[in-house]
Image (cartoon, helix red, strand yellow):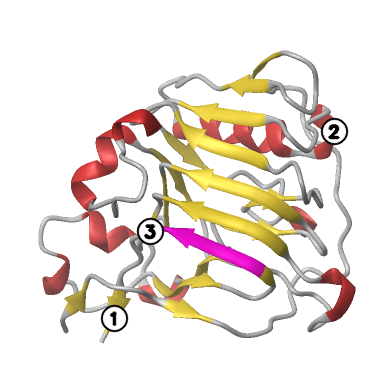
Amino acid sequence: MSVQIGLWLLVGLAVLGGIFSPGAAQAAVCAFSGPHGSGTYTCVNTGNPVANGQNLSDTIHPASGIACGDTVVLPRGATFAAAGNGPGGMNSFTGWLGCTSRPITIKSDGLANLPAGVRVSYASTPQMATLTGTSADPTWNYWMGAGGYTFQGLVFTTADLHPSRHAPTIVFHNVADGGGTDQIHDIVYDRVIIRPFEESQPAPDSIPWRSASIGLRLDGIRMIGFAPRVPTEN
């Protein structure tokens, strides 16, 4: 089985989590400065990916007070493991809000070391923050009608899953009604890497399975990618 570094996209419609509503977040959020609408959440690396992930999940949940126009800064080299704060308790980081003219930006603090317009490579990962799944759920998901999210300098990946428990999609756009007013919208992937766990290993071609079927679903409106890297399986 060969793995070609290229574009792994599936554009389609999906129904997932439409019956759920946002639950309450926990109290732990990243440090905030400035007024909401233009403020910055600065997350730290606790050294524990699960604790990091819980803090990030709590920060991006509406209960934290996060607003359109805010920025979340993640430390380069840190790993954030998805907690059960997604729709219906899914182990997914989730975009909940619907923003348009003022997006929520989630970025690595090493972004300045990743030149704009230059496609990132696996050698770029020391300057990036990693969001990883912990189960067969998507690593990142969206609530119905969510939009206005910009991701910069991030790695989206899966846990080390046996193929019988693989994650069908790493980054999932939840178009719960199959189109119409609930479509995901205005998402930007800027200098990001989306890859299954195996691609982080020294010899991924020697691994006869993949822990994800799809890297990124581009369901929705105004989906933009700048210099991303998404592996594909042939």
Which secondary structure dominates the residues rendered in magenta? strand
> Pointer 2: what residue?
63
| Residue 141 in the figure: left or right of residue 179 | left
Please tell me which of labels 2 and 1 falls first in the chain: 2
Residue 220 position, x and y percent, is: 69, 73
Give me the C-alpha separation between circle 2 and circle 3. 31 Å
Quadrant showing the C terminus? bottom left
**Residue at 31 percent of width and 69 percent of height:** 231
Mark 1: amino acid: Glu
In this rendering, the answer to whether 123 lies above or below 222 is above
Give the camera-side residue of 29 and 103.
103
Residue 92 position, x and y percent, is: 62, 53
Residue 77 position, x and y percent, is: 33, 31
**Residue at 25 percent of width and 61 percent of height:** 199
Instruction: Tell me if residue 87 is in the magenta stretch.
Output: no
Q: Local crowd at mark 3 within 10 Å, few (<14), some, or many (≥20)?
A: many
In this rendering, the answer to whether 93 lies above or below 45 is below
Magenta residues, as a range? 222-226
Give the camera-side residue of 18 and 187.
187
> Pointer 3: what residue?
228
Give me the C-alpha separation between circle 3 and circle 1. 16 Å
Please tell me which of labels 3 and 1 falls first in the chain: 3
| Residue 133 visible in image | no
Q: Secondary structure at mark 2?
A: helix
Please tell me which of labels 2 and 3 falls first in the chain: 2
| Residue 152 in the figure: left or right of residue 21 | left
User: Mark 2 or 3, which is nearer the eye?
Assistant: 3
Q: Secondary structure at mark 3?
A: loop
Give me the C-alpha separation between circle 2 and circle 1. 39 Å
User: Mark 3 or 1, which is nearer the eye?
Assistant: 3
- Tell me, for residue 233, which label it has, or none: 1
Residue 181 position, x and y percent, is: 88, 72
